[in-house]
Amino acid sequence: MAADEEGLRVRLLGPVQVWRDGMELSLGSARRQAVFTVLALRAGEAVTREELVDAVWGDNPPASAMGNVYTYVSALRQILEPARGRKSGTRLLSSLPGSYRLHVAADDVDALRFDALREEIQRHAAVGDRAAELRAADAALDLWQGEPLAGVPGPFAETQRLRLSELRLATMERRAALTVELGHPENAIEELRSLAEQHPLRETLHALLMTALHRGGRRTEALDVHRRLRARLIEQTGTEPGAVLRSVHDAILTGPEAAEPGPAPAAPGVPFVGRAAELDRIRGAVRDVAAGRGASLWVEGGPGIGKTALLTEGLREAAALGCRIGWAVGDELTQPMPLSVLFGVLGLDVTPAPPDDAGAALSDTAAGYATAAALERATTQVRAFCADRPLVLVIDDLQWTDEASLLGWRMLHRLTRTLPLLLVAACRPIPRNRSVALLRRAIEPDNAHMLDLAPLRPAESERLVRVLAPGIAEDRRIAGLVSAGAGNPYYLRHLAVAAGSPGPDPDVDPRPELVAAVGDHLELVAEDTREVLRAVAFAGGAGTVAEISAMTGRTAPDLVRAVEEALTAGFLYEQGPRLTFRHPVVAAVLRSDTPLAIRTLLHRAFAEKVAQNAAH
C-alpha cells in the first residue's frame, strides 16, 4: 500500500511531530526520535543499521548501539501501526537485510518539501520569473515552525539543524531581495532589520537592508547601516566589508537608486563607459556558448578597475540568448570552507567541513574521498545543466576562493571543450595566491580568453566623470578629476560625486568615503609595502629606490619584495628610475590620513634623510 494511503505526515522544521490519519503520534524518547529523523529525511531509501548508529552516537557508540537501534525501530513500528502484530510486518517501516526503510512520500515530510521548493525557486530564478520565485519562497518559509529537529540528539541531527537553518536564512534573504526588486521595499525592512540583529556580521543581510532602506527613500539610514557594520567587522574580525557590501554602498553614494545586492552588482543609472574591445570578446564568448561552443574567460585587474561592472555589462544578454547563469563571489572569510564557492555558483548545498581541531573526525584519506565525491557531484550537475541549455558560471574575486573550488574549476574547464559551458573568472593580482596562479597557467593555453584590464583611457575617464557629475561644466576641473583618478573607475566615481557635492576639495581633503575606499585597497598589501607607499606619498608622489631607502631606513635589497608588490598591485609604476603613484588620489589619501602636525614633521624628516643620502 502506498504511503499516502496511510495518511502519514512528518514535521521536522520545528519540534519533531508525526500524524497518521490526522491523529498525532508520540514517538517517545529523544534517541527514538533521532532514529526516526534519519529515516524520514531519507524517505523511501534503505538506511543501514551502521548508518543509524553513526547518526545517533557518532564516533563513540556504546557496545549496545546495534541492539538499541533494533529496539528503537521495533518501538517505532508499534507506534506507527499499532494494529499490526510483531510478526506480520509493517507497510510504513519495513526491514531489509541489515537496513530499514520508511515508506512516506517526500511531499509529506516538511523538510523534504522545503528542499523541493528551494529547487523550484532556483528553476523560476533561472528563467527570470520573479513573481513565481517569490510565491515559492513564501510557500517554503510557511513550512517552518521553529528550530528544526528541536531537541533531537546526535551528530546527524546537529548537521541537519545547521544545514536547514542556513537554507532557511538564505531563503529569507532571497524573499526579501525579491520583495525589494518587485517594488515593495517597505515590506522587507523590519524583517531584514531583525535578521541583521540576529546575525550581526552577515554582510548579505546588511546589504539587503541597506538596499531596502535606500529604495524606501531612507538613504541616511542605509549609509548608517554600512558605517556601523564596518566598525563592527574591524573591531571583531579585523577585516573590511566584502565585495557585495562595498558595491551596494558605492551604488547608494553614486546613484539615485541603490543597486540590488547580489552576485553581479552594478551602479544603477550609470551607463557603462569604455572597454569596447573587452566587451566584444565577452559578448562573443556568450554568443559562442549560446551556439554550443564552450570556453573559459579570465579577467584580471587591480582593485576598483571595473571587473565586476565589465562582466555585468558583457553578460547582460546571456539569459535572453537562452543561457542559465550562476554567479558567486569569493570571500576571504569563507576560504576555509571547502567547495563553498563552487557549490555556491551551482546553487548546490554544501555541508561545512569540521574544524581543524576536530581530531579524528575525518582522516586525510576520508576527507580526500569526500572531496572527490563532492567534485563528482558538481561535475554531474554541470552536465545535467548543459544537457538542458547552455550554462554560464561566474566567480568574482577568485583570489579568495577555497582550494577545493579552484580544483573543481579546473576540472570544469576541461568540460568546456565538449559542453556548452562558459566559465568566467575575475580576480585581482594581489593578494598573491599560488593556487590561482597555477590555475591561470593551466587554462591559459587551452580554450581560454585572457583579459588583463588596464586603466581607462583619459577620454573614457572624462566620459565617466561627466556622466557621474553632470553639474561640473569646467573642462579644467574635469581634467583635474581625470588626472587624480588615473583611469580607476572606483576612484573616479568617488571623486566625481565628491566634486559635485558641497564640501572641501576632494584633491586636498578627501571625503571619508574615499578614504575608506582607498583604505580597503591598501589593506590588500603587506604593512612593509604600505610603508613604502607612505614614503613615496610624502616624497611628493614619486621617488627613487635610494630615496625610499633613506626615508624608511631600510636597505635597497630589503625593499625589493615590497616594491614589487606595490607595482603588481598597481599602486606604483616605473617612470624611468622613479617610482610614481599610478593614482594620485591614493597618495592624497595617505597624506590626508595623517594629522597635519605629524605630516609636517614627516615632510621635514624625509627631506633631511634624502639630503643626507645625496651628500654621501
Image (cartoon, helix red, strand yellow):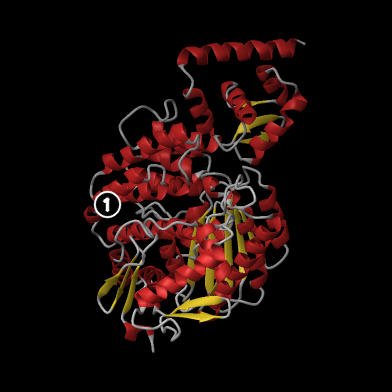
Place of residue 265 in the rendered image (x, y in percent of width and height, measured from the top left)? 42, 54
* Nearer-the-camera pick, 227 or 425: 227
Task: Name which quarter of the figure residue 513 lies in.
Answer: top left
**In the image, is residue 48 above or below residue 500?**
below
* Residue located 31% across and 81% down the image: 7
Residue 277 appears anywhere in the view: no
Q: Amino acid at mark 1?
A: Glu
Residue 602 placement, left or right of 611: left
* Nearer-the-camera pick, 562 or 16: 16
Residue corresponding to mark 1: 191
Place of residue 283 in the rendered image (x, y in percent of width and height, measured from the top left)? 53, 67
**In the image, is residue 274 above or below residue 413?**
above
**In the image, is residue 471 above or below residue 602?**
below
Task: Name which quarter of the figure residue 477 lies in.
Answer: top left
* Image label count: 1
* Residue located 50% across and 71% down the image: 70
Quarter of the rendering occupied by the C terminus: top right
Residue 459 placement, left or right of 262: right
Residue 606 placement, left or right of 145: right
Place of residue 164 in the rendered image (x, y in percent of width and height, measured from the top left)? 41, 60
Place of residue 384 in the rendered image (x, y in percent of width and height, measured from the top left)? 54, 77
* Residue located 58% across and 54% down the image: 60
Badge 1 marks a residue whose secondary structure is: helix
